[in-house]
Image (tube, coloured by chain):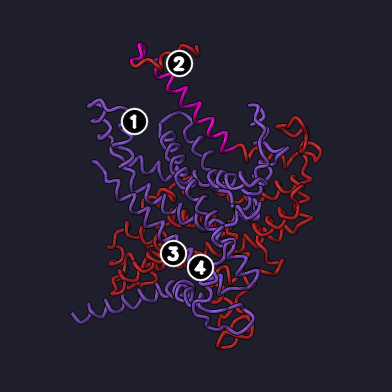
Chain colours: A purple, B red
Amino acid sequence: MASIGKLNRHQEKMAYVFIAPTLLLFAVFTIIPVVMALYLSFTNYDVLSRMDWVALDNYQRLFNDSLYWTTFKNVIFYSVIFVPLNILLSLGMAMLMNFKRFGIRMFRTLNYMPTLTSAVAAATVWIWLLHPEFGLVNEILGWFGITGPAWLAQTETAMPSIIMVTLWQSIGSNMVIYIAGLQGVPDYLYESAKLDGASAFARFRYITWPQLRPTTFLISTMAIIGALQLFDQAFVLTQGGPGNVTKTPVYLIYQQGFKQLQMGYASAQAFILAIAILIFSLINMRINKAEEPVV
Amino acid sequence: MDTHITRTRNSANPPNPALGKLAAGLLFYTAAALIAIAMFLPFFWSLSTSFKPSDEIFSVPLRWLPSQFTLEHYIDAFTTVSFGLYFKNSLFLAVAGVLANLFFGSLAGYAFAKLTFRGNQPIFRTLLAAMMIPGIVTMIPSFYVLRHFPLLGGNDLFGSGGMGLLNSFWGIILPGAAGTFAVFFMRQFFLTLPSDMMEVGRIEGCGEFRIFWNIYLPLTKPALATLSIFTFQAGWNSFLWPMIVLNDPNKATIQMGLQAFTYNNQTDYGPMMAGALIAILPILILFLLLQKYFVQGIAFSGIKG
């Protein structure tokens, strides 16, 4: 008995040795920063001079900072369009790519390729595609007699352009997740529905969609968290312009914190953004809970 | 032919099932081809632009293919900007990230999956919960931690005096060296392996580390391959954090180099496309070689939810 206890104790000790590096890094680069995030937002930390406690000054300033709320409005506009479209398109594509047909693997590969690109490289390529005079997009629109706009330079089309580029880049991997989800839906559900004479739409509405609820929840949660933190594409495609219509909170936090070195104030901005992300994730959870599966 | 198919599709009860099948096939291939073209066109167009002589880039009407292939834009990209250096920096950072995550991730993942200890469940749950914290929350404090890292980069014991780990590759590698995703991913894989090999190892007198390293780790090769790809892709494509940490132009990554280049050369589309393609190429090659592992990895990240 004593030796078993000793063995277990040895095992336990080794287990802690095994997880020690991970825990150490986790403490230094996750736990300490999370605790500090709130603290810094109550200080005037600016890297160079002494850090002082300023209580709620940063938050007061924030509530009167119209640029901050503009960036908030921008990113919410972006998310409200991007997230549902992302789900719709990747699910549609997954259902199409779920057919067992000749050449399906090639189609899947082509659809997945954009997700391999980095945000910067993708944005660089799209700057050229969206060129008002020599860009491919406006050339193709021209075939149909449409004169395309100066996508990235006009206030009405700048944000839709970013939506388009980020959709192009992200629906491929969500498609693969949805295909895995679709393959997990048991066949007998469809077979019995067919016997009962359910239409294709009814089968989608009452079998596919409810069965994919966990997948949709996962994809929408990740999409919301990512969308509200939009930065790379807005930074490279439009530099936040024209007239701040594509400036996002993360962009502003980057400028305020790392260019103007007002890190205390930028921390307050980051904290409010994190709360917004939490609220939107909770709303999303509610919506997904409301859609109870029928089977 | 065309009208025939449309008629068949529109009627509620196709008189000829073979025709209905043909129509469905036609519909499928039209839709699939249109989508695939839309997804692939940006690659094709940037590739074509990057090989065109400068005067053909702005030709009206547009040319789909270059009349003659030229490598001048690639040479430009490497000579006007230090793309070679950036490429090397990115490769170093991405590979270091992969190695660190493979080692620490599998070590911790093995402990959580196979070893019994009191803190197992609560610690693992804490790690998982922390995955939900948005990156923006930890961005500024992590910068603070790096700058005031004790005893490194000219800092004293209390973390002041120098620049800490800022402007060094450690500032990129360390925060991501033992990603929670790596731990979680490896744990799930170790859970599928039987525990009796562990007992045999112990009876034979193997140490715990040797059991992990010599018996279990070799069995996880497919999981390690998938994890490598994902970590490499994340490291290679990351942009904002390296831009914050690295100020020295000689330490810039390929994404930073490409961005600066794009920003300064909004009219030089040939070298711009060449640069973008160089930045995409390593991941693309990795993907084409290891496609199987890519798909497994994403499907897994979908199942975890």
Sequence order check, earlier mark of 1 and 3: 1
Q: Residue at x 40, y 68 (%)?
A: B108
Locate residue A201, reporting x and y percent: 34, 30
Label drawn at residue A54: none
Does residue B305 show up magenta in the picture? no
Question: Can residue B32 be spotted in the picture?
Answer: yes
Name the residue type under label 1. Answer: Phe
Q: Residues within 10 Å of mark 3 (few under 14, many from 20)?
A: few
Q: Mark 1, residues whose alpha carbon is within 10 Å: few (<14), some, or many (≥20)?
A: few
Distance (Cα) linking label 4 and label 1 = 47 Å
Q: Is residue B143 above or below residue A184?
A: below
Q: Position of residue A66 (x, y in %)?
A: 57, 62
Identify which residue, B97 or B242, lies in the foreground.
B242
- Residue sitting farthest toward the left: A1
Residue highlighted by disc 4:
B177
The Cα atoms of the two marked residues, 1 and 3, are separated by 38 Å
Place residue A276 in its image quadrant. bottom left
Q: Main secondary structure of the magenta part?
A: helix
Closer to us: A32 or B285: A32
Q: Residue furthest right?
A: B55
Q: Secondary structure at mark 3?
A: helix
Where does the magenta region start and end?
B13-40
The chain carrying label 4 is: B
- Check disc 3 and give the amino acid type: Ile
- Report the residue marked by disc 3: A275
In front: mark 1 or mark 3?
A: 3
Which mark identifies residue A201?
Answer: 1
Chain ID at mark 1: A
> Do the residues bearing badges 1 and 2 touch, measured as CB atoms within 8 Å?
no
